[in-house]
């Protein structure tokens, strides 16, 4: 990786961001940074994933996260809320609070949506899945509808637990995320009057 001159992209989330069970270089933030460098961007992508974290946990460490002075944040949280059956309204409130804090500091936000397993019942799944598009339409974020697009339920792209992506799965995620991150970079650099990557 060349010299990082353009800024910091912070990947905020749970085990799906941390890259549970994999070497750091196989997580999606590391793979995304390589893709950005290949396209001429010089952003450092910092992995701030905490396994097992709920959206309430992510919200509780925003002040600490802001100390890293990110220019862009990729927000991927809520899967553990869903798996624990936490009220989707709590998830919505947490996501909105997190996004508002970042926007107040002129941090561009990429919000990646989650979808919950159907075993939790149709009403809960509908309410949970509806949180992300509702939040994205209410706030000025770059919205990726489903973080695990093309990876969820694909045995060859996930670890043995069938929930957490393997290195190949994260490669798909990083590639899927790239255009959304580029949009966020364009927003950020428009504000700072800097030319975008090559």
Image (cartoon, grey):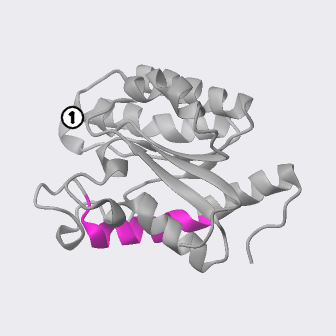
Determine whether, in the image, residue 21 is placed left or right of residue 75: left
Work out whether 38 lies above or below 187.
below
The answer to whether residue 2 is seen in the rendering is: yes
Answer few, some or many: residues within 10 Å of disc 1's Cα (few below 14, many 20 plus, some between 14 and 19).
Answer: few
Q: In terms of secondary structure, what is the magenta stretch mainly? A: helix
Q: Which residues are magenta?
A: 165-179
- Residue named by callout 1: 120
Work out whether 14 lies above or below 2.
above
- Residue 128 location in percent, x, y? 38, 34
- Residue 44 location in percent, x, y? 57, 58
- Residue 65 location in percent, x, y? 53, 33
Q: Secondary structure at mark 1?
A: helix
Q: Quadrant of residue 99?
A: top right
The residue closer to the viewer here, 1 or 171, is 1
- Residue at (23, 34) in percent of width and height: 83
The residue closer to the viewer here, 46 or 157, is 46
């Amino acid at each position: 990786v060349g010299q990082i001159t353009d800024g910091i992209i912070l990947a905020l989330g749970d085990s799906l961001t941390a890259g549970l069970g994999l070497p750091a270089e196989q997580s999606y933030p590391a793979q995304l940074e390589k893709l950005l460098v290949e396209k001429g961007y010089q952003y450092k992508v910092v992995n701030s994933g905490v396994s097992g974290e709920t959206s309430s946990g992510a919200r509780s460490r925003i002040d600490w996260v802001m100390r890293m002075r990110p220019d862009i944040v990729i927000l991927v949280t809520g899967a553990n809320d869903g798996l624990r059956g936490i009220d989707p309204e709590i998830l919505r409130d947490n996501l909105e609070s997190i996004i508002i804090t970042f926007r107040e500091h002129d941090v561009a936000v990429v919000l990646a949506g989650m979808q919950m397993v159907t075993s939790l019942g149709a009403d809960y799944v509908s309410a949970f899945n509806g949180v992300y598009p509702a939040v994205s339409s209410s706030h000025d974020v770059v919205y990726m509808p489903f973080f695990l697009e093309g990876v969820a339920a694909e045995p060859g792209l996930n670890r043995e637990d069938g929930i957490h992506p393997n290195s190949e799965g994260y490669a798909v995620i990083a590639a899927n995320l790239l255009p959304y991150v580029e949009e966020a970079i364009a927003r950020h650099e428009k504000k700072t009057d800097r030319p975008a990557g090559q």
